[in-house]
Image (cartoon, rainbow, N blue to C red):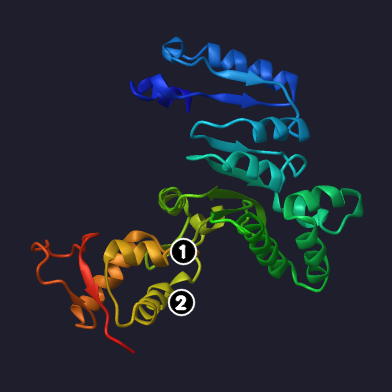
Amino acid sequence: MLERAISDLQMRQHLVAIFNDKNSENVRSLEEAIKSLPGVSQLRHKPVVRNYEVGETIIAQLEKVSLIPTLFFVDPWGYKGLSLRLINSVLKDWGCDCVFFFNYNRVNAGLGNDVVEDHMNALFGKDRADQLRPKLAVLAPQDRELVIVEELMQAFCENKKRYVLPFRFKNEKGSRTSHHLFFVSKNPLGYSIMKEIMAKESSTSTQGVPSFEYNPADLRQPLLFKLTRPIDDLTEMLLTTFAGQTVTMQQIFDKHNVGTPYIKKNYKEVLSQLEAECKIVTNPTCPPRRKGTFGDKVLVTFPPR
């Protein structure tokens, strides 16, 4: 990250980089690594490396200050220190987004362990965690994961206008989940940008729809992904959701993509196909389009249902 900033004239004038680790040896190692970076002195703001344990003290400090636009990355190496209050303290200010490492296996075990009950309550919220524990007791392992991830997403969205994206990582064999990365933002544009990034890093896609998962096994032994047809699902959704409406391509994407696996090129592909099949009408006053394109400003009229 610092190397990229050094190489960019504008970024090296504006980037403020603050790192923190509770391990003193890691802090010293990182400080030495930063000092050895060629051109690091060109950064207007010298990178700061701190040595704190993330907990109530840091959260209280974050709650009191007004942050500049910040991308906050949290890797708790488990779950201690990761809490709703911590994420809320960062996202409260304009232009602030958060990425956090979610150790699913540790949290899955922790939800059934009374010893770490306080940590689980801090992460999900006490009421939600209390309702979640009995649900999980009767679920199969694969269903437990779906429920836990869904509940965590709901926890970060509850009573707030937020956008949450999870990205799953599998182990080398592809047999179990190792962890997730969660992105949380208050801005639909931030959500859209991160969605495109995660889509490119997905190990597989079906009909161009990304899996939002990195699974090393997928790269070695592709499975029967083409048995599912998610594009067909999107076609039917759009015809139903926007029935009788006239909207632009960009409005369709903005209103519909949140909470779905679809990226912008999926919408353009579906709309182009619907246009070719005469199932929608596009604005004839739009400038002539190149064959195979579907611009963001193209007006689309959907038939009533």
- Total label count? 2
Residue 39 on image: x %, y %: 42, 12
In the rendered view, tell whether residue 106 sits above or below residue 224: above
Query: Residue placed at 72% from the left, 33% from the top?
Result: 60
Mark nearer the N terminus (1 vs 2): 2
The percent coordinates of residue 277 (x first, y second) are 21, 82
Front-most of 185 and 40?
A: 185
- Front position in the image: 24 or 124: 124
Under circle 2, the secondary element is helix
Q: Nearer the viewer, residue 199 or 177?
A: 199
Residue 98, x across and y down, in percent: 56, 42
Q: Inspect this view and state whether residue 74 appears.
A: yes
Q: Which residue is mark 1?
A: 261
Which disc is residue 273 wearing? none
Amino acid type, residue under disc 1 in the picture: Pro
**Camera-nearest label, 1 or 2:** 1
**Residues under numbered marks 1 and 2 in contact, where contact means CB atoms less than 8 Å apart:** no
66 left or right of 191 in image: right
Residue picked out by circle 2? 227
Inter-mark Cα distance, 1 to 2: 17 Å
Q: Give whichever of 102, 162 is nearer the camera.
A: 162
x 68%, y 41%: residue:
86
Q: Amino acid at mark 2?
A: Leu
Is residue 127 shown above or below 284? above
Give the residue at x 67% y 21%.
50
Quarter placement of the C terminus: bottom left
Badge 1: few (under 14), some or many (20 or more) residues near its Cα, within 10 Å?
A: some
Q: Residue furthest right?
A: 115
Q: Position of residue 185 (x, y in %)?
A: 52, 48
Q: Is residue 305 above or below residue 214?
A: below
Q: Residue at x 54, y 16 (%)?
A: 34
